[in-house]
């Protein structure tokens, strides 16, 4: 794991976006894993500015969303299909035909989940998976006790996650109870992972993910098994890390050839 601690949320978005841009510059047909939620919005905004300036081109890239609610209408503004279209596909100029979101409306959600993993594999796997982390340590919607070997599947949302996401809905009861999410095993198959976290509310989850034991109780800790995971956090989200001075020292003294920002 590489841990990058930056002064504030804006820097987190800027630096994580540079990492994603590097992948797409190297490989214009890159396959991106796309997270929703508040955490990656600065990444998408930063990339969109560079697209608008003609510095980056996502038209040949493809994407797979990390997760989707089950039972939410496609056209609902908070379905992840809508969010991905609004926050990612349109501002980055991606081809909508190359961007998929798990089908939370399928009559057979289990078959839809299996087919989703097969489609990721058929695309050659995800080059770079963008991630946030929930306050309870979830990544995607892999709630505590999710298997490290799990694949895309249906999950029940934890009460805390429903409460956290209630801000996106008019009424907390409207937050769906179930979701389809890439599994921890699916996420671990990505060639590279970039996770961002901002704010004190994420500090305990970040500490558990980076320095805690490998444990299904903190699904983010599965990333300790990944060969190429970059964790980009602001000071507040880093506030419970015990080795924070070491991470700063490492980042500041990276050899030039390893630098991307
Ligand atoms: C959400 C999403 C995750 C996200 C996490 C944190 O509900 N399913 O992909 O990373 O929970 O959310 P946020 O970034 O809004 O804090």
Image (cartoon, rainbow, N blue to C red):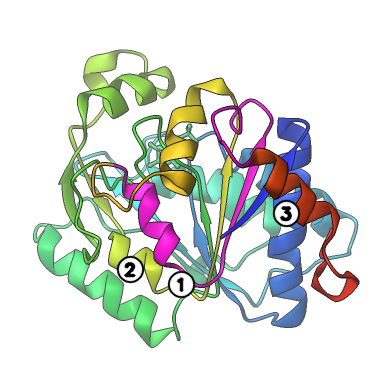
Return the disc, 2 or 3, that comes first in the chain's sequence: 3
Badge 1 vs badge 2, beta-carbon distance below 8 Å:
yes
Viewed as shown, does residue 224 lie left or right of 103?
right
Of 178 and 174, which appears nearest the observer? Answer: 178
Q: Quadrant of ligand 1?
A: top left
Residues under labels 2 and 3: Cα distance?
22 Å
Q: Is mark 3 within 8 Å of ligand 1?
A: no
How far across and down, in percent of the image, does residue 109 sit? 13, 58
Q: Residue at x 86, y 76 (%)?
A: 257
- Residue carrying label 1: 190
Residue positioned most to the top: 171
Residues under labels 1 and 3: Cα distance?
17 Å
How far across and down, in percent of the image, does residue 221 sit? 38, 51
Secondary structure of the residue carrying tag 1 is: loop
Residues under labels 1 and 2: Cα distance?
7 Å
Q: Report the span colored magenta.
A: 218-243
Q: Residue at x 31, y 60 (%)?
A: 184
Magenta-drawn stretch contains 237: yes
Secondary structure of the residue carrying tag 3 is: helix
Q: Residue at x 78, y 39 (%)?
A: 11
Of 125 and 86, which appears nearest the observer? Answer: 125
> Considering only vertical position in the picture, is 114 above or below 238?
below
Q: Which mark is residue 186?
A: 2
Of 74 and 45, which appears nearest the observer? Answer: 45
Badge 1 vs badge 3, beta-carbon distance below 8 Å:
no
Graded by Cα atoms within 10 Å as few (under 14), some (14 to 19) or many (20 or more), the crowding at tag 3 reads: many
- Residue carrying label 3: 17
Viewed as shown, does residue 102 lie left or right of 211?
left
Graded by Cα atoms within 10 Å as few (under 14), some (14 to 19) or many (20 or more), the crowding at tag 1 reads: many
How far across and down, in percent of the image, does residue 74 sit? 33, 45
Viewed as shown, does residue 170 lie left or right of 115?
right
């Amino acid at each position: 794991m590489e841990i990058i601690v930056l002064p504030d949320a804006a820097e987190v978005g800027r630096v994580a976006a540079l990492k994603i841009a590097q992948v797409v510059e190297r490989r214009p047909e890159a396959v991106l894993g796309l997270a929703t939620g508040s955490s990656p919005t600065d990444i998408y905004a930063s990339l969109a500015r560079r697209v608008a300036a003609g510095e980056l081109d996502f038209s040949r890239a493809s994407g797979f969303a990390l997760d989707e609610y089950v039972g939410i209408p496609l056209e609902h503004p908070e379905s992840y299909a809508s969010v991905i279209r609004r926050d990612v596909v349109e501002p980055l100029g991606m081809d909508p035909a190359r961007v998929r979101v798990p089908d939370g409306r399928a009559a057979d959600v289990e078959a839809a989940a299996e087919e989703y993993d097969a489609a990721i594999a058929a695309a050659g796997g995800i080059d770079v998976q963008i991630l946030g982390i929930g306050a309870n340590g979830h990544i995607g919607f892999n709630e505590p006790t999710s298997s490290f070997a799990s694949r895309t599947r249906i999950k029940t949302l934890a009460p805390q996650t429903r409460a956290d996401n209630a801000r996106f809905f008019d009424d907390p009861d409207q937050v769906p109870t179930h979701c389809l999410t890439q599994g921890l095993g699916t996420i671990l198959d990505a060639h590279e992972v970039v996770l961002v976290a901002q704010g004190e509310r994420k500090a305990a989850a970040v500490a558990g993910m980076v320095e805690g034991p490998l444990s299904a109780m903190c699904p983010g800790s599965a990333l300790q098994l990944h060969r190429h995971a970059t964790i980009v956090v602001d000071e507040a989200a880093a506030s419970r890390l015990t080795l924070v001075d070491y991470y700063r020292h490492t980042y500041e003294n990276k050899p030039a050839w390893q630098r991307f920002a």
